[in-house]
Amino acid sequence: MNSYTNIVKQHRGILLWYGFLVLICFGGVYFLAGSYFLVGYCETGIRLFGSVDCGHGISPLVVQMNAETLDARVASLLPPLSYTSGVGWHLLGTDALGRDVFAGILYGGQRSLLIGLSAGVLAMGMGWAVGMWSIYARYHTKVVPYWIVGILLVLILFWQTQSYLFLLFIPGWILWRWWSRRKPVKPVTTIGRSWWWGRWIEWYQALPDLLMVLVLSAALGSMSWWGLGLIMIAVIWPSLALIARRVAVEVTLQPYFVQAIRNKVSGWHLLNHYLWGNTKSVFWGLFPLVVARIILLESTISFLGMGLPPDVVTIGSMVSSSRQNISAWWLIVFSCLFIFILVYPLLRSGMKNRHQRRAGIATN
Amino acid sequence: MGRRFVYRILMIVPVTLSVLFVTLFLFYKLPGTQVFDSEQIVLGSDRELEQLLRGQVNQDPFFTTPGLFYFSLKAGYIPDSMYLVPMAFHASFKSLAEDVSRPMIMNKYALWIGREIDAVKSKDSVNVTARQLLHILSASSKHELEDQIDLLEIAPDNRPPVWKEVLSSDRLRSIPPVSFQWNGFQNTFHYYIRGLITGQPTLKTISGERVEHRFHRTVRWTLAYTMPVLLVGWGVVFLFVLYFYDHSALLARLDRILVFVYSFPTFVLAMLALIFLTSHRYGAISRMFPFPVFLETGVRDLGAIYRNYSFELLLPMLLFAISPMILFYRVFYEKIEEIKMSQPSYRYLRHTGVSASDFRFKYLSKYLFVATWALLSNLFVAILGGSMIIELIFNIPGLGRFLYDSIVNYDVQSTVYLIFLFTVVQQIGHIVSDVMIEYFFASGDVKSDML
């Protein structure tokens, strides 16, 4: 049995739970609440997955509204278990604009899951790749044509900014040349590429998150879920790279790694089998925690009004709207519960992984 | 290690300067629509719009500099006098300049904008009103500019000739792709460095108040609820974990409970607390705490905050305490469990008859201190920045809210001041944290390359 089968077995609970949530949030818009039908009859004939506006056969059972539907028949701030004739049951009530909270949670859940899972994979991948490389750079002795990379970066930056930023590369290049005139770096004592990588990651982490979120959201124009995901990747990856760096440092201090260096094991083998192979359990252990963090961050950004456009319903924007409607307790309570069922299993899973790792260390 | 330590200290300077540069660069890249969205321009009264524009241009020395850095390299179609245009409108101006592709004409246009803004600032008679100027500034193409001019309903004879020149120009084909310009010390970056280090020119908020005054005013509010909470929270958790270190089942159960609490983000907990504990709408429980109202008037020092608002601050304190206390507990708990499993000296010391208090305070506490050091950089920023979310929800006029307002309101000087401060503090925190890890983690002859 390979290690990936083991990982799937270890995470069986969380995989099943998230499969269930995906089913509810994505399938729910056809079966429970939404403006689509599963099978319907329109003027053009029988159709699958169409809009309820053109007539319907099997339509959402609870309420025929999506998260953003504004229907004149639906009153605002209806309490849970209210009924509107011709529209359906408002299981969790309606908000100040008459939008259905249950539909809002299904659609908001879709967005949270999409952003959390996709941005989680990409942020972990990027953070780990940079973190591993930042340590591996100490042992990378082949001459890399950095000047080609430098010129490419300058061209890209100039094309994008038509301005000043690439000027930073001139002192950077001079500094790099000054350092690189030394003899090849011995991997133990002197300041080398690895050190610079570490400082660069820290430098990036020192950039103000809030400012980055604002600027990137402005630069990307009308925000979409993938745009929001990109922003969160840009904000989160440095902290993951620092964790990867610290874990990789531990590996490089082990006798087997020192011996591998002495035996002149190839660079790819070092990177893939030694560094990645010995840190992937930490990677997969951290993954649920990162997804949870992204879901929380997404809802916080939406709460602050910096995420998706204000007319798009998200879990964070639902909590935010409860500020203006203190009497409507259902707006905040159900959103909170949904955040909890999204995040708690991930945190529990991450915690379990940590305990297992610790137990593994002790046994070994 | 000593040499590396010196390098790390020296690195604070370029790191801080480059973060400062990137911050300014990001502001330059911010499109004006982020602040002056069209709805605001359409809905505001003339007086409000005038104030809006004046607020933007009152940070004069930083806007009327030829460039961002000591030298600039710009696209050939952008005129040298672009710095006369308020920074919030650089994006639309650049876009219009690209559409016109005549640097000489755009140069005249920028000079005209500069004169009009001077007139708005000095309240002299102006050719166009603040509202009209805002509409003109937000145009990002010839087509949009034409539409805006038509909307202004100014008779063709009264229109400035430069408008006609811009609209009727045809694109110049032989523009150099890049133009180089030496700005010397007359650049925004240098002004900010001088402002931050020497205090000349003075950094001011968008409302005209000195930034350091505002900082001093806000920092005491943040310290009022963060400092005691962090100190007490750390102490409580530290002593609790040391006292119950051998009650594994209890610690594990508490860990599970804390993960449960941690699943709710701070803004959710704060909103729940605000609605169900302060709103007076859900029975006795909602009257437990007073509805938070914090007024800055009459608050001159930290003592005044505690005298006037100690009861109101209780709930924000409790909410702020949750996150760091959970963090401390989980880190300490993990450390204790790790020691129990991996350190042979744990059992050995117990069997040699070391007293329980010596074992706790001379052996285990050392490890917990190291874990605390590792969290130091984050703690510094947490103390200074407070929790922005809590300050926003409870309307506390603290530092986190100050930073949020500065960024959202395009207050460049305040943002730069705060980010400069946070960067330095975070860097120092990183160094202390890495020194401690290097000292305790790696053996004398092997360096971990963390520092």
Image (spheres, grey):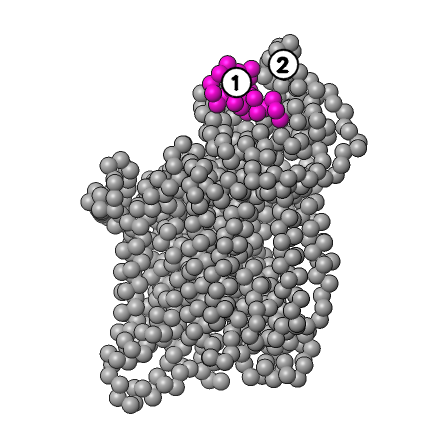
Q: Main secondary structure of the magenta part?
A: helix
- The residue carrying mark 1 is B129
Dot 1 amino acid type: Thr
- Residue that appears at 76% across and 36% down: B176
Q: Are marks 1 and 2 in contact (CB under 8 Å)?
A: no
Kindly tell me whether residue B178 is visible in this rendering: yes
- Specify which label sits upstream in the sequence, 1 or 2: 1
- The residue carrying mark 2 is B159
Stretch in magenta: B110-136
Name the mark on residue B227: none
**Separation of residues labelled 1 and 2 (CA atoms):** 13 Å
User: Foreground: B444 or B312?
Assistant: B444
User: Foreground: B403 or A347?
Assistant: B403
Dot 2 amino acid type: Arg
Residue B118 forms part of the magenta stretch:
yes
Mark 2 falls on what kind of element? loop
